[in-house]
Amino acid sequence: MKIKETIIPGCLEITAEPFSDERGIFIKTFHRDLFAAHGMQTDFEEEFHSVSRRGVLRGLHFQLPPKEHAKMVWLMEGEALDAVVDLRVGSPTYGRHLLFQLTPKNPTVLYIPPGLAHGFYARTDNTAMMYKVTRGYSPEHDSGILWNSAGIPWPDVAPLLSPRDRNLIAFSSFASPFQYEERTSR
């Protein structure tokens, strides 16, 4: 596994190294000691699996303090455009977003620290995503920002959204409770 820092502090792109033979492929998506050595939280409480049809946009989601969580996501099947937005006040990348093209030929795991909003757009039918989170789902802390309010160039101006996602607050109206804390070492 190769772990690469992105321009958003704490957000890591992990490239899996698939093993393939006549049976298919085998990919390691998690390695506690390696991840901990890179400053990643590794005590995951819950895991989720979503399957979306083409044109679905899920996000931009996060949990509010004190139930904020780090998240790991990866594509199991299909293709997705994955996005994160830095919501941490004082961060050098506050308000900026990053996009990741997730495809079967690009076995990438994303580590998303607390204080980043996350979402994705399904480019194909049966886009299957896995998520690990360091804190369990807390309905009273579950939140998000409106998908089209953070400057992300989504490939669809009218994606299929849940009623909840259609009614999230715009980024410009969001009073962020997240504070950036610079990591001193790994």
Image (cartoon, helix red, strand yellow):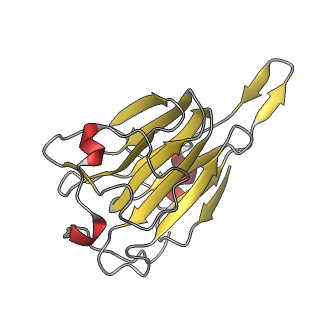
Which residue, as the protein is rendered here, is positioned at the far left?
140
Which sits in the foreground, 61 or 29? 61
Q: Is residue 155 above or below residue 88?
A: above
Name the residue: 59% across, 40% down: 123
Q: Is residue 76 above or below residue 114?
A: above
Displayed quadrant of residue 88? bottom left
Q: Is residue 170 above or below residue 142?
A: below
- Asked whether, in this view, residue 76 is left or right of residue 160, the answer is right
Which residue, as the protein is rendered here, is positioned at the far top?
23
The reply to whether residue 176 is in sight is no
Which sits in the foreground, 181 or 103? 103
Residue 147 x/y as whole percent: 37, 55
Residue 62 x/y as whole percent: 30, 52
Which residue, as the protein is rendered here, is positioned at the far right?
22
The reply to whether residue 76 is in sight is yes
Name the residue: 59% across, 55% down: 100
Badge count: 0
Name the residue: 52% across, 62% down: 153
Displayed quadrant of residue 13? bottom right
Residue 143 x/y as whole percent: 23, 51
